[in-house]
Image (tube, rainbow, N blue to C red):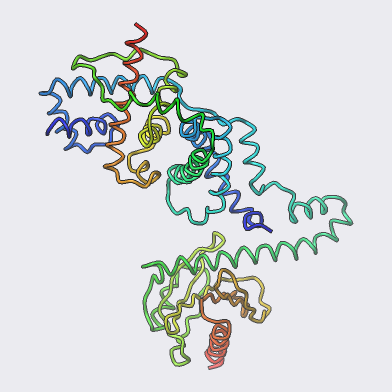
Amino acid sequence: MTCDEAKILLHALIDGELDAGHAREVEAHVATCVACAADLAAYRDMKRVLADTNLRYTAPSQLRARIEASLPRAERPNRRAVLRGFAMGSAVSALAATGLLAVVLRQDDQQRILSEMVSAHLRSLQAGHLTDVISTDQHTVKPWFNGRLDVAPPVIDLTAQGFTLVGGRLDYIDARALGAVVYRRRQHVINLFVAQTANTALRPPKTETMQGFNCRHWTNRGLNFWAVSDLGADELAEFTDKFETAMKANLEG
Amino acid sequence: MSPTSDDPDKARRFREAALPYLDDVYTLARYLLRDASDAEDAVQECYLRALRHFDTFRGDAIKPWLFAILRNVCNAEYARRANRPSAIDDAPEAAEQTPLWRESEAGPETEMLRRRDATAIRKLIDALAEPFKETFVLREINNLSYREIADAVGAPVGTVMSRLARARAMLRAAWTAEEEQSK
C-alpha cells in the first residue's frame, strides 16, 4: 500500500468503516511508515477530543414549537374528538350522538380502508409481490387459502368471461389477514380482496376512486369484497357482475 | 384543505419518525449556515418539505433523507446570500479559510492537540470550506456512516472518504496553527 492510499484509508480505519482485509493492509503499512503512523495517531487523538466535546447544537424551543404547530396534530379536536366529547356530555346527548358517531366513524374507517386497499394493490404490483400461489386453476388457488385464513375466499375462474385468474395471495389490511385473488385483463391487474364480515346483508357494489385506481366494494353472503384495479370503472363493474353471476351459478349448481 | 392536514395518520408517523432528529438537523444547519436565525428558518422549511414528501420516503434511515432535504434548503439560502448586494459575511470568512487549504505542515512527530473548549472547536469547524465541512459534520457530529453520508450528499462513498480526509487535514492544520500562535 502506498502512502497516498493509506492517507485516505486510515480515516476509514479510525471510523471503523474498513473491512478486515483492508484494515490489516492499512495497519501493515502504518507499522512500517513513520509519517503515516504519526498521521494515524494525530487523527485518532483529534477524533477523541472531538468526541469528548459537545459540538452539537440544541434546537431552540420556539423552533420546535413552530414545527410542532405546523404539523397536523393528532390531538387536534377533529370530528371524532368533538363527537366523543359531545357523547360524554350527557346521557341523552350521548344516545343522540351514538348514531351520528357510528355514521361518521364508519365513513372515516371506510376512507382509511379504501386507502389501505389501494396501497395493498400498489404493493402487489411490485416485482414478485403479486401472488403467493400462481395458478390459473381455481382448484389450486382455493385450497391454498385453507388454513391460512379464517375465511375461504371464493376463487372463480373467469377466463371465459375475459378475466384471467392469475393466482392468490395473503395480504394484510387494517392489521388483519385477508385473501387477495388476482385476476388480469389485458395488462391490467385486478386484486379482489376478500374478508369476512358479521354483516350478512347484501350491499350492492359501489365504485370509489382513489389515486387513479378504481375500487369497487360490495358485501354478499357474509363476505366483504373490494376489487381494486387501474381498469376503467365500466370494466371493473363488468368484472364485479361476472364474478357475482358466476358465484350465484356455483352456489345454485 | 391542504394535502397534509387531512391525513392525521401520516402526520403522526412523520412526527414519530422525524421529530426525534430535530437537534441533528438543526446542528447541521448551524454549521452549514453559520447563523442561528437562518438555521432556524432552514430547519423549519426542511421539516415542511419533508412532511410534504414523506410519501416518497422509502428508506429505513430517515436521518440521511432529512439531511439531503436540508442541504437543498441551504443551497437555496447560499444562492440568496450570493445575490445579496452586501455580502458582508462572505469576505472575511473567505480570507480566514485561505490558510486552511494548505495541508498540515507538521512534521512526522505526533503533535498532541491541546484540549479546546467547544466554542473554539466550533469556530474551527465553521471555518472549514465546503464541501469538506458538511462531510466532516455529518461524520463527526451527526454520526452518519460513510454510506449514509453518500446518500445524504448524493456523492459516491469514495468521494466522501477523500473529502473527510481533506476536512480532517484542514482542521488539524488550523488547530495546530492556532496553538502555534497561542504559544
* B167 shown above or below A76: above
* Residue under the point 79% across and 55% down: A83
Which of B105 and B7 lies nearest the eye of the viewer?
Answer: B105
Judge from the rendering whether residue A213 lies leftward or rightward of residue B168; answer left or right. Answer: right
Expressed as whole percent of the image width and height from the top left, the position of residue A62 reads 65, 33
* Residue under the point 26% across and 31% down: A11
Judge from the rendering whether residue B165 lies leftward or rightward of residue A61; answer left or right. Answer: left
- Farthest residue toward the front? B85
* B124 shown above or below A138: above
Q: Determine the image quadrant of residue A165.
A: bottom left
Which of A100 and B120 lies nearest the eye of the viewer?
Answer: B120
* B4 shown above or below A197: above
* Residue under the point 66% across and 57% down: B2
Expressed as whole percent of the image width and height from the top left, the position of residue B22 reads 54, 37
* Residue under the point 58% across and 38% down: B41
Q: Determine the image quadrant of residue A219.
A: bottom right
Q: Quadrant of the N terminus of chain A?
A: top left
Expressed as whole percent of the image width and height from the top left, the position of residue A220 reads 62, 80
Expressed as whole percent of the image width and height from the top left, the position of residue A144 reads 41, 74
